[in-house]
Amino acid sequence: MADSQNRVQWVYSSKNNQELEDRYNQWAADYDRDLDEDFGWVSPRITAGILAGHVARDAKILDAGAGTGLVGEELGRLGYQDIHAMDLSLGMLEVARGKGVYRDFQQMALGNELGYETDFFDAVISVGVFTEGHAPPRSFDELVRVTRQDGFIVFSLRVDLYEEGGFKEYQAAMEERGRWKLAELSDPFQPLPKGEPEMLHKVWVYQVTS
């Protein structure tokens, strides 16, 4: 457990995207085992289940920050087949490729311009990416751009980071500008019940309006 916790803090302390990518590349082979056995990571299952309440099974879905494909596996179990993976780390994407649940793999970083056409996806899901030292609030602008009008953006976010990391204000500003509207907000839950039970996440579901 201590080694896994140290590895998480080592990744979170990355000073830039290059360092973050390098550290995820090194973690990729052990990531699934660490998250399952040491932390009991439940966010992929919970967030995919919430998405399923809003998004048709034939939808084209972007898994933004797909990592090793844990979210894609959950979506596959729910009957989704047109799933596209993007992540900062090629090492993580290589692990995801072996799971056979994605149609496409792209190396991209949230917070930068994404190499997808406007209105390309019916929905976006992002789990565990809006966290300390990772994707910033401005990432939402590109996620809205690549999602068609009336499509959905579904993401998990640490409750403390929502309050203190600029997300609350940014999400509200996007709603005020008519970019999206809130469709569902989950109750808080423990995403890492074995490893960090004091941490709380919620899942936000926004419908794109422009």
Image (cartoon, helix red, strand yellow):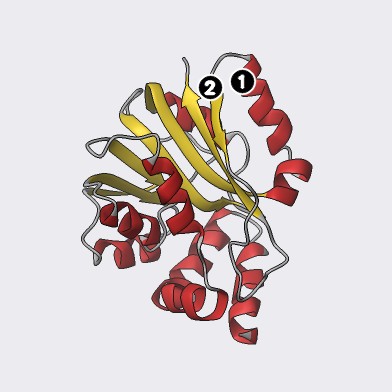
The amino acid sitting under disc 1 is: Glu
Residue drawn at 57 percent across, 14 percent down: 178
The amino acid sitting under disc 2 is: Trp
Expressed as whole percent of the image width and height from the top left, the position of residue 99 reads 25, 65
Residue drawn at 65 percent across, 16 percent down: 176
- Spot the residue most to the bottom: 2
Expressed as whole percent of the image width and height from the top left, the position of residue 89 reads 43, 59
Mark number, residue 180: 2
Q: Secondary structure at mark 2?
A: strand
Q: Residues within 10 Å of mark 1 (few under 14, many from 20)?
A: some
15 or 41, which is in the foreground?
41
Expressed as whole percent of the image width and height from the top left, the position of residue 185 reads 59, 38
Direction from residue 83 to residue 28 in the image, left or right: right
Instruction: Provide the residue designation for mark 1.
Output: 175
Q: Residues within 10 Å of mark 2 (few under 14, many from 20)?
A: many
Q: Secondary structure at mark 1?
A: helix
| Mark-to-mark CA distance, 2 and 1 | 5 Å
In the picture, residue 172 is in which quadrant?
A: top right
142 or 49, which is in the foreground?
49
